Image: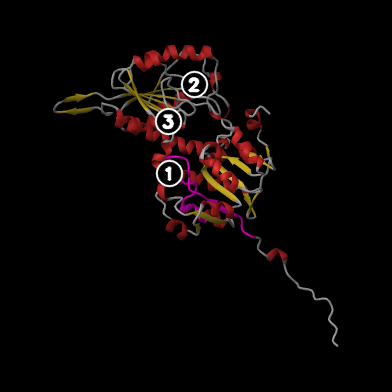
Amino acid sequence: MPQFGPVTLNIDISSVASPAMKIAVVKETFPGERRVALVPNAIPVLTKLGLEVFVESGAGVSAGFPDALYVERGATIVSTRAAAIAAADCLLQVRALGTNPVAGQNDLPLLRAGQTVIGMCEPLWNPAAARQLAERSVTLLALELIPRITRAQSMDVLSSMATVSGYRAVLLAASTLVKMFPMMTTAAGTITPAKVLIVGAGVAGLQAIATARRLGAVVSAYDVRSAAKEQVQSLGGKFVEMPLETGAAEGAGGYAQVMDEAFYRRQRELMTRVVAEQDVVITTAAVPGKKAPVLITAPMVEGMPPGSVIIDIAERGGNCELTKPDETIVHGGVTILGPSNLASDSAFHASQMYAKNMTTLLTHLVKDGALHFDMTDEITRETLVARDSRIVNPRVLAALNV
């Protein structure tokens, strides 16, 4: 009988492809949210990284991206949300649990240990939601925490979405105001231009200044950060000079920081005169993780001309004392609107910008076809919120009082 010895198979293990990491995109479930986390043109960027992309059917329809476009660019369409989440090693969302507090709870039972969620999740404002994900051993990255450093600019979701919001705020103001924005000389006489005040000269405020100027308004702006003066003037706006100590008002990353009540009291006294001269006031001032400071009081509103408009897009309460989120109210003849999701109104381009931010971050994180978290890297360290069943971000731990 023939004898057979051990057989050795000469296989080069390095040539055996490991399973591709699977990325999934689901339909947004927050009421009125039309954006999508990934657009079709972004998919080839991820496939070149060795990733496989799954998209819940209909996820991009509200933003103008039908399923067929995703298929053309290399994605696989799955019929249900549960199937998309089950397929995912990494789930991409516009609004993760912290920014989708009600409907987002329905996703928790679908998530499994070891998965990664990347999206906006308000971890400094709603840290309890981040803790819920950590308790399920889900790794969480919060796009709001991308550091504002030069090499992370193309990942900065807050700036991208603020650009859209600032633009939309001016259009909303123009359509609500009983006057027209530009000066016009007509056979019926000369129409004087509308006066517009932008409160907060961050990304949203600067875009609002540029848009209002293009529409022909006379634009002025105020910001507690003295560094904003040059930016406002470069766009053709007049910087409202306040004889206050403003240098200490700028915090990390160029954001405004919380000041004491005495500062805000003096600020409101000085703002009263400026606001009374305006046809439109657009407020954008925010402090990360904090309630928005009240800069426009009820007496200021009452001093504005009848027919004037306030568009308050500051998150977490608003800058106007009378603002009611997502409602329109009229007080003393002044119309006050508090839209909370203006970026969704331009969902096509907002989604394009969001997807670019997302894919740039993934390109930074993916090594050899998998997510790699280098904690010596500032972008990774600042953005990572939860890992290994615990909150790892110091700012979120502080928000949890841990």
Image label count: 3
What amino acid is labelled 1 in the image? Arg
Circles 1 and 2 in contact, beta carbons < 8 Å: no
Of mark 1 and mark 3, the one earlier in the sequence is 1
- Say which mark, if any, is on residue 34: 1
Task: Name the residue rendered at 63%, 36% in the picture.
Answer: 131
Q: x and y percent of residue 298 in the render?
A: 40, 16
> Do we see residue 135 in this rendering?
yes
Which residue range is magenta in the image?
A: 19-44
Residue 372 as seen in the image, left or right of residue 119: right
User: How is this picture coloured?
Assistant: secondary structure
Circles 3 and 2 in contact, beta carbons < 8 Å: no
Q: Which residue is mark 3?
A: 206
SS assignment at label 1: loop
What amino acid is labelled 3 in the image? Leu
Of mark 3 and mark 2, the one earlier in the sequence is 3
Q: Residue furthest left?
A: 187
- Residue 41 painted magenta: yes
Q: Quadrant of residue 206?
A: top left
Residue 334 as seen in the image, left or right of residue 129: left
Circles 1 and 3 in contact, beta carbons < 8 Å: no
- Residue 216 painted magenta: no
Q: Which residue is mark 2?
A: 293
Task: Name the residue rendered at 80%, 76% in the picture.
Answer: 7
For residue 136, above or below residue 401: below
